[in-house]
Structures are given as structure tokens and as C-alpha cells.
């Protein structure tokens, strides 16, 4: 059996204002798996992702990453192992230039200058954005920003990629180009989205999250054809299945 | 409301730098942690952008100043926020005033701190509409105090600028009214849709 | 709402563009402080001439500079006019109805205006000849307190993001019939709009901070930059500093 990349045992989370975010989440994700997490708005997808590299740390749940429990001592290593990519690339590209952004992670790891430059250059090449080093984020298209957001995480050489809504706000061409890019990455991937078309193209396994609970977990080819299941959780229109929802 | 280069005597603008440096150093090193620095900066960007909005006034239009809003939303960090906004304004938009960055930060930043105090104290009183009332008061007071400090600078600088003061005061009367209404509406709105936002990240 | 575009001519080639940004900042800042200290009108004129000369050398189009002087003119011109009519010293040289202009008043008003314009014009060779992100890194290298430079850096980055956001909000308002006339309703709507911007910005600030944490942020915001100071950089700085001193000593 393959090694576990992520192991979550009975994770619950309540927002500071008292509303429940996650309830009793139990899930194991194996190394090299590509898992789609789908669910309606407010299902808790982003909240779940934020637990995967210790931005949120729950007191009652155990989240283990590559066999290590998330805690004070392990957090630094875990943030290096788990690359988290946010929905809005403007939230993630906070440095003055593309290069500064992609180099931010490696610099924080304390890598020597040459290694920082090597990793940043390589990460930009992986996402097809080499030559953009000196560009300014506000001069880039959404698609370019999304690619650079990926590079900014790849420069940390993560074992696990966690991506929130990778295709939102992309036009079809940018979207399929982006899907090709993600397909080319071989590490463990967790992708949260309601773009079922993309999930189908990229994931072998799908988890449905609704109201903070896992309501389904299985192979993509089984889940995404279960029209009744999708309809019950607001993932398919009531009369017609298989169409992805356009969302903003 | 800000003073460009070449107008004030060195005594005045140098004092401005001294006060600004001391206050900024105090707030940024003693009252700001690593989590707050990026957040305060992003809110500063919002204040900067909001101050680019033009409000029609007679045949012309005016920019909002919003130093009161800086106080309400950022507390003590309003002072470095005002300073950063002024630096960017001087460098990016050439509103003039490299030598006067310090004194301008005092003119706008101290009233921002006063607005913070006024708003924080006032909204503790349990009356209806307290956010609108004290938001408006904080906004208007911040401008009025700014005009006062501005006038004091012109008065003490000894470059025969006393006669300018009445013009400055009159020109800013509508601005006081505008900022009072805008900030009153703003504070009430934010208190309704996101009450915790008004407790934002005022440093301890 | 205008985007900051002060560095749009940073890509030109000129001796000022090639100048090390640190030396350039120090030297031109020195010149600016020197200009505001001048008390003699003729020397102030020389300062203004130096400022214009530096713009010419930098090849920045002069109409770009003029276009950016509106802000300072708005403050300086009325101020000079008031001084012109209110400050009386020396011979009377003109009279309009009940207003008189004296030679002393004219000189003082001119001195203030010339100093102000010279100082503002000097910002262009200093800031417009280099990309602003490089200017910020140069400031850091010049030991400007690092927390202040960080604040400037983040604020600058998010100004662009938030201008877009405000433009979207304004468009949405306009499409729902908001005209922005001169009335209380406009002010209240503007207040709510800025309130909404503020609430969204707080949420964004939280998300940005999470993104920073997840890439290992612990307070360190270093960037890799390489500046190289050559002899010519120092020479250019020396010349300008000498001019700065001369403007006040001669």
C-alpha cells in the first residue's frame, strides 16, 4: 500500500463567531494521488485547505502530513512540504516583482543566494513563465498571475500541492492551458473547486464536502456520474447533469 | 491639505521630521508585530485609493483626505499609514513636498490619532446611531484639527504667510462637512455589515 | 481615478537612467533640500534651471513633467498670489483698485514659487528614471528603516489591486443609476462604498497574510538585489552635491 501523504482524523473547526466550519472530517490521501474536493459555496472547502499547512490549527483534530502531526515544531517543515495556492492570485503575489515573489519562499527557508536564484528560475520555467522575472504583478493577466502563483509555491519543492479554485476567472483557453500545466505536475494534489470539468480532467478521486461534512468520497468516474448525488449538494442543475457551474 | 516644498522655514519642517520620526519609530517597533505590518499596509493602500475618489463641489471637485478614517480603522497605526500615504503621494503623484513630508504627517497624522480616540471613546456610549454620530464627528474633527495645525505652521514659519490662513480655513469648511457626512455614513454601514471590522487591528 | 505611472519612462536610456539608484537618491534628495533652503531669488532661479537641465538630460518628455505639476500648482499659485498682494515691503510697483504690489512682495512670492517648482521638478530625474520597485529596494539599502520600506512596498503593490476593485464598484454603482451629483446622497453613497472597500480590504489583508504564512513568513521580507556602484556613479553624485552646496553658500 502507498504511503499516506495526508491523514485527517476527526477534524472539526468552529469559526470565531461560533458558526461550525468543519465537522468530524476523516480522510486519508495517499502519496501521488490527485484528489478533487468539490462542494457548494460555503461548504468548508477553503477552511479544510487552510488546515493542511497549519494556517488553521484545530485543537480537537489530528492532521498528519507525511506522518508528522501539525504542531509548533513541525510547522516550518510542513509549510515547506505543503504548497498552498489561493484562489485570488493577487492575494498571493504580494511582492514587488515576479522574481521577488517566486524567491520569497526559498529566501524564508534560509537557502543561499545561488540556490534561491536557481529554484526561482526553474519554477518559472516549469510554469512557462521564464523571462517574466522582472515583470510587475499589476501588468499581468489573471492567467499569468495564476501561473506565477504556482511557481511561487513550486520554488519550495513541495511534496503536496493544495490548490483552491484554480480555474476561477480564467477564459476557456487559459483554463485548458492551466489544466495541462497542473496535469504535468506529479506530486500529490488536492484541488478544491466547483469546476467539475476540470476535476474530471485532473483528479482520480473526488470528495464532496457539504455543510462542513464529507458526504461522498470515491473514484471520479463513479461520483461525477451520480447525478442525484451532485444535485443533492448543489453541484448540478436540477434538470441536467454534468454541466459545470459558472461561478465568480 | 498639505504643504509643498519651498514654503516653510527650516525650523518648522525639521521639527516635523523629528516628531514624525519619533512617533513612527514608536508605533512601528513597539506597537506593530510581523502579522500587522502587511495588514496595516494593505489597509493603507485602501485609504490611499479611497482618497483618489473625487467628490463634486461647485464647478470643481475635491479629493477626500480621510485621515479620520485612518484613525478609526487603524488606531495608532494611522500615523505610519498617513506617513506612507504622503511619501507615496509625493513620489508618485508629485503633489510636492519632500522636505515637508514630516510636517505634513504631523498635520494629518496627529488629528488621525485624535479621531481614533474620539471614535473609540464615543462608540462605547450605548446610544442609538453612535457609529454614525461618532464616525462623522471623528471625520470632521480630523479635518478641523488638520486645518488648525496647518494654520499654526503658516503662522510660526515667519515667511509672511499669516494672510494665507483665512483662505485655507474657508477653503476647508466644505471639506469638513463632506468628511463628516462620508465618515458618518461609512461608520454606520460598516458597523451594520461587519461590526468586528471596526475593531480591525488596532494595535493593543 | 489615475494609476500611478511615475516610472513609465524608466526604460529610457540616459546618464541619469544609468546612474546607481542609491547614489541618485542621495544626490538628488540633497539637491532638493538645498533648493528649499535658498533665500535668494537669483539662486533659486539657478536651482530651477538645474532641475530643468536634469530633466532634459534624463530625456523624460517635458510634457509628462508638466502634466504632473497640476497638484503642486493648485497649492502654490494661489499661495503666491496671496503673498503678492498681502506682503508689503519696498517700493510700490503696481496697484489694482485697492490691491498693491510691492517689490518685496513680488520677490518673496516668486522665491516661494520658484523653490517649490524646482523641488518638485527634481523628483522626476530622481524617481521617474528607475522602476519604483528598484527605488524601494534602494531606499532599504540606504538604511531607511526596514519596516517603513516594507509598508511602502506593500502599500504600493496593493494600490493597483484596489484601484481596480474601486473601479469595479463604481461601475456597478453607475450601472444602477448613481450619477454622483453634488448632494448628500452622493456623500452617503461614497461613504458606504469606501466602507465596503474597507471591509473587503480587511478580508483581503487576512488572506494575503495567510498566503505569506504558508510560504514561511516569519517577519523576514528580504529581496535579492544587486546594485553596483561605479566610479562614474560617485562622480555624478559628487557634482550634484557640489551644486547643492554652492546654491546655498555662494
Image: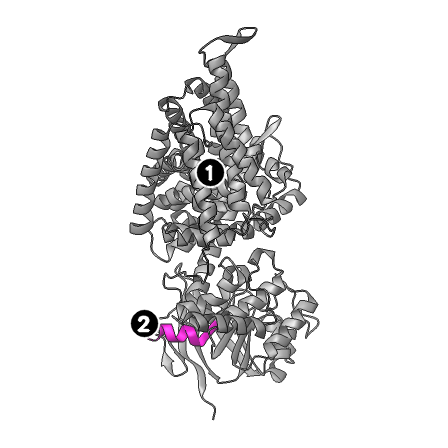
Disc 2 from disc 1: Cα separation: 41 Å
Residue B28 badge: none
Looking at the rendering, the stretch of residues picked out in magenta corresponds to A73-83
> Would residue B116 be found to the left or right of residue C174 on screen?
left
B56 left or right of B173?
Answer: right
| Discs 2, 1 touching: Cβ within 8 Å | no
Q: Is residue C118 visible?
A: yes
Residue A245 covered by magenta stretch = no
Q: Are marks 2 and 1 on the same chain?
A: no
Residue A81 vs residue A16, the one in the foreground: A81
Kindly identify which residue carries mark 2: A72
> C2 above or below A38?
above
Please tell me how crowded label 2 is: few (under 14), some (14-19), or many (20+) other residues with Cα within 10 Å: few
Depicted B198 relative to depicted B135: above or below: below
Q: Is residue B95 something that shows in the picture?
A: no
Secondary structure mostly seen in magenta is: helix
Residue carrying label 1 = B66
Q: Is residue C43 above or below residue C169?
A: above
Residue C26 x %, y %? 43, 45
Image spot of residue A29 (x, y percent): 48, 83
Residue A77 is a magenta residue: yes
Amino acid at each position: 500500500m502507498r504511503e499516506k501523504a495526508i491523514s485527517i482524523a476527526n477534524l472539526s473547526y468552529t469559526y470565531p463567531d461560533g458558526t461550525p466550519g468543519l465537522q468530524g472530517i476523516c480522510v486519508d490521501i495517499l502519496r501521488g494521488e490527485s484528489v478533487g474536493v468539490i462542494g457548494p459555496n460555503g461548504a468548508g472547502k477553503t477552511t479544510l485547505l487552510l488546515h493542511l499547512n497549519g494556517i488553521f490549527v484545530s485543537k480537537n483534530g489530528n492532521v498528519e502530513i507525511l506522518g508528522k502531526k501539525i504542531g509548533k515544531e513541525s510547522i516550518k517543515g510542513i509549510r515547506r512540504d505543503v504548497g498552498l495556492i489561493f484562489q485570488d492570485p493577487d492575494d498571493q503575489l504580494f511582492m514587488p516583482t515576479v522574481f521577488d515573489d517566486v524567491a520569497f519562499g526559498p529566501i524564508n527557508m534560509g537557502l543561499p543566494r545561488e540556490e534561491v536564484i536557481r529554484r526561482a528560475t526553474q519554477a518559472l520555467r516549469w510554469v512557462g513563465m521564464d523571462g517574466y522575472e522582472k515583470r510587475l504583478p499589476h501588468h499581468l493577466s489573471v492567467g499569468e498571475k495564476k501561473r506565477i502563483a504556482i511557481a511561487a509555491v513550486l520554488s519550495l519543492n513541495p511534496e503536496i500541492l493544495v490548490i483552491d479554485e484554480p480555474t476561477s476567472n480564467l477564459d476557456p483557453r487559459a483554463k485548458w492551458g492551466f489544466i495541462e500545466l497542473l496535469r504535468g505536475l506529479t506530486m500529490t494534489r488536492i484541488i478544491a473547486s466547483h469546476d467539475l470539468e476540470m476535476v474530471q480532467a485532473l483528479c482520480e478521486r473526488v470528495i464532496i464536502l457539504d455543510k462542513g461534512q464529507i458526504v461522498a468520497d470515491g473514484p471520479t468516474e463513479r461520483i461525477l456520474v451520480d447525478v442525484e448525488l451532485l444535485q443533492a449538494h448543489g453541484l448540478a442543475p436540477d434538470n441536467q447533469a454534468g454541466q459545470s457551474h459558472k461561478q465568480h | 491639505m498639505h504643504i509643498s516644498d519651498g514654503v516653510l522655514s527650516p525650523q518648522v519642517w525639521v521639527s516635523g521630521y523629528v516628531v514624525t520620526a519619533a512617533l513612527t519609530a514608536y508605533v512601528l517597533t513597539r506597537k506593530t508585530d510581523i502579522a500587522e505590518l502587511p495588514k496595516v499596509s494593505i489597509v493603507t493602500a485602501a485609504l490611499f485609493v479611497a482618497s483618489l475618489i473625487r467628490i463634486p463641489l461647485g464647478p470643481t471637485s475635491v479629493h477626500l483626505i480621510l485621515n479620520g478614517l485612518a484613525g478609526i480603522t487603524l488606531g495608532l497605526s494611522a500615523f505610519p499609514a498617513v506617513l506612507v500615504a504622503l511619501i507615496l503621494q509625493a513620489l508618485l503623484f508629485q503633489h510636492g513636498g519632500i522636505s515637508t513630508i514630516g510636517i505634513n504627517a504631523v498635520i494629518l497624522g496627529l488629528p488621525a490619532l485624535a479621531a481614533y480616540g474620539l471614535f473609540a471613546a464615543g462608540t462605547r456610549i450605548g446610544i442609538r446611531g453612535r457609529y454614525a454620530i461618532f464616525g462623522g464627528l471623528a471625520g470632521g474633527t480630523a479635518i478641523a484639527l488638520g486645518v488648525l495645525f496647518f494654520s499654526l505652521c503658516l503662522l510660526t514659519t515667519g515667511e509672511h504667510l499669516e494672510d494665507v490662513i483665512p483662505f485655507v480655513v474657508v477653503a476647508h469648511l466644505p471639506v469638513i462637512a463632506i468628511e463628516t457626512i462620508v465618515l458618518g455614513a461609512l461608520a454606520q454601514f460598516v458597523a451594520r455589515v461587519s461590526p468586528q471590522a471596526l475593531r480591525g487591528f488596532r494595535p493593543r | 481615478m489615475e494609476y500611478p505611472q511615475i516610472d513609465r519612462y524608466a526604460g529610457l536610456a540616459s546618464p541619469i537612467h544609468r546612474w546607481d539608484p542609491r547614489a541618485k537618491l542621495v544626490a538628488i534628495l540633497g539637491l532638493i533640500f538645498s533648493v528649499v533652503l535658498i533665500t535668494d531669488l537669483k539662486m533659486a532661479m539657478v536651482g530651477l534651471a538645474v532641475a530643468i537641465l536634469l530633466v532634459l538630460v534624463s530625456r523624460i518628455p517635458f510634457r509628462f513633467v508638466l502634466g504632473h505639476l497640476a497638484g503642486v500648482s493648485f497649492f502654490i499659485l494661489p499661495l503666491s498670489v496671496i503673498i503678492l498682494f498681502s506682503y508689503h515691503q519696498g517700493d510700490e510697483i503696481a496697484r489694482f483698485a485697492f490691491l498693491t504690489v510691492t517689490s518685496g512682495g513680488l520677490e518673496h512670492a516668486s522665491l516661494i514659487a520658484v523653490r517649490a517648482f524646482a523641488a518638485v521638478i527634481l523628483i522626476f530625474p530622481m524617481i521617474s528614471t528607475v522602476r519604483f520597485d528598484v527605488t524601494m529596494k534602494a531606499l532599504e539599502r540606504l538604511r531607511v528603516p526596514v519596516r517603513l520600506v516594507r509598508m511602502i512596498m506593500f502599500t504600493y503593490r496593493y494600490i493597483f489591486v484596489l484601484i481596480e476593485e474601486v473601479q469595479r464598484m463604481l461601475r456597478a454603482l453607475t450601472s444602477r443609476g448613481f450619477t454622483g451629483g453634488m448632494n448628500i446622497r452622493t456623500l452617503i453613497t461614497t461613504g458606504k462604498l469606501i466602507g465596503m472597500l474597507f471591509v473587503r480590504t480587511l478580508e483581503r489583508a487576512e488572506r494575503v497574510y495567510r498566503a505569506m504564512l504558508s510560504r514561511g513568513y516569519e517577519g523576514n521580507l528580504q529581496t535579492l538585489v544587486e546594485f553596483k556602484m561605479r566610479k562614474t556613479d560617485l562622480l555624478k553624485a559628487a557634482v550634484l552635491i557640489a551644486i547643492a552646496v554652492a546654491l546655498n553658500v555662494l
